Image: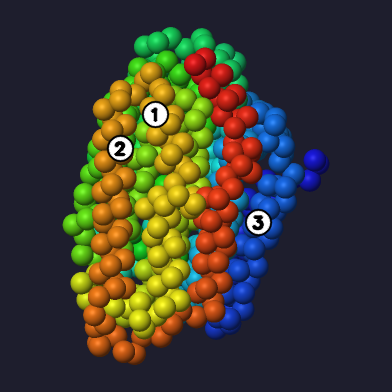
Amino acid sequence: MDFPILTYMTFIPLLGMIVVMFTRKESVQLIRWESALFSFIPLVLSIVMLAKYNGSVPDFQFIEQHEWIPSIGISYFMGADGISVPMLFLTALLSFVSIVASFNIQERVKEYFAFFLLLETGMIGVFCALDFFLFYIFWESMLVPMYFLIGVWGGPRKEYAAIKFFLYTLFGSVFMLVGILVLYFAVEPHTLNMLTLIEYNSTYTHAFQIVLFPLFFIAFAIKVPMWPFHTWLPDAHVEAPTAVSVILAGILLKMGLYGLLRIGYPMFPEAAVYYAIPIGVIAVIGIVYGALVSMAQKDLKKLVAYSSVSHMGFCVLGLASLSVTGFAGCVFQMFSHGCLTGAMFLLVGILYDRAHTREIAAFGGLGVKLPLYTGIFTLFAMGSLGLPGLSGFVSEFMIFIGAFGSSFVPTWMVVLAVLGVVLTAGYILRMVQRIFLGPFNTKWEGLTEINGREIFTLVPLGILTILVGVYPKPLVDIISATLENLIRVMGM
């Protein structure tokens, strides 16, 4: 296919940003629709890409490679495989949904949408870049728009949250940059081509891998965020505007896991085995800790934020298992969590816009007043809980099978992780019960039902949650050949 689909997907939002910047700031409606259009085109392209992608071929497809700075071995190299194709689709979908959900932003509308489109370019770029220089540019380019989106349009403690997010991520990126430079000089001829560096993985000594792997691991662990690197997450989530929380939970958290699958594991397979137990321990602590802290939350948005720490712990457990099923469960959970938690943040935002509080105890009996909202909320809450028939169940089930059958993860870890599922059911059911059931709090007489635009943002996520839960085969077909190849490359 000669059409450079990945380049178009990546840079159309950037073009949109330029168009928005040249639109008069008084034309608020026009700016909104321009932004929606420029994020809708990548969504259409990502659906075309899903349709054209051949899941039986483990290699990269839609490859675009051009000389860029040949003197130092840098090329413009893009491609997509079974790990990145679902993530590209999810990124394009959530970006479009978030932009539509941002139509109620009133202040500095022009700057808001310009930053949002710039952020989308960075996110899509990370998932297609196959050259380290390119990957790093995209990885860092997401920091600036995210910093301003939280710091300008966020809640009361927005500056603190934005600076904390910025410093944490920058701290991780420095480690990654050191790792990239060491790799660059370790290989003759010097190159930043990821695929070439992966091919050379058998030539890296054991000590080299064990020293280098943690540099990448820390950078990616902060992004996931794994316990104990997670402390930026609740602040960033609670202060960020609704649509930014959706992107943060739906896409940015997945980039850390994507980085490990794309870079950390295939490049340093011996280190992946060497560190399997510590990574498993981090995963299990994350699962149980995230669930326990969620139980203690009084703020609805904080509860959903901490539940992400727990859900991402399952992904990390899948990685620690070093098995095809565990890896597949991890990619599944990345996709499923993006849909579920993205929707949960939209729903929390919808309620907050009406009630101006997120205090769980302040509600009660809303099921009588807002039956449609309650139904939609319950669907996504049950998905997060892992109810069979919804996407959350499939991913956790695959992760448990992968981890249980793995020689790298001891059984006690899996047992503790299962305890995490029980705790998850506890805090989610309690949340649903306290907000929607029980006696109706008459203070909320004036609340209005969910409107058409809000339903429009939630419908695609609901459809995906149910489809992937009932019929996971299409997604399995996309990812399995790539993951089998990944295990082969790692020499497992």
Residue located at (66% from left, 51% from top): 46
* Type of amino acid under label 3: Pro
Number of labels in the image equals: 3
In the rendering, at what x and y percent does residue 284 appear?
Answer: 28, 35
Say whether marks 1 and 2 touch (CB < 8 Å): yes
Q: Residue furthest bottom?
A: 446
Viewer-nearest residue: 145 or 300:
300
Locate residue 277: give its quadrant: top left
Residue sitting nearer the eye, 245 or 386: 386
Q: Which mark is residue 42?
A: 3
Q: Nearer the viewer, mark 3 or mark 1?
A: 1
Q: CA distance from mark 3 to mark 1?
A: 36 Å
Residue 306 position in % (x across, y down): 29, 53
Q: What number is the disc on residue 417?
A: 2
Which of the two discs, 3 and 1, labels the residue nearer the N terminus? 3
Is any atom of residue 15 visible in this view?
no
Residue reaching furthest to the left: 296
Q: How far, Cα to Cα, is label 1 from label 2? A: 10 Å
> Horizontally, is 157 left or right of 184 in the view?
left
Question: Measured along the vertical axis of the image, is residue 486 above or below residue 165?
Answer: above
Q: Which residue is mark 1?
A: 403
* Secondary structure beneath label 3: helix
Point 49% across, 16% down: residue: 492
Please identify the quarter of the rendering in which residue 370 is found: bottom left
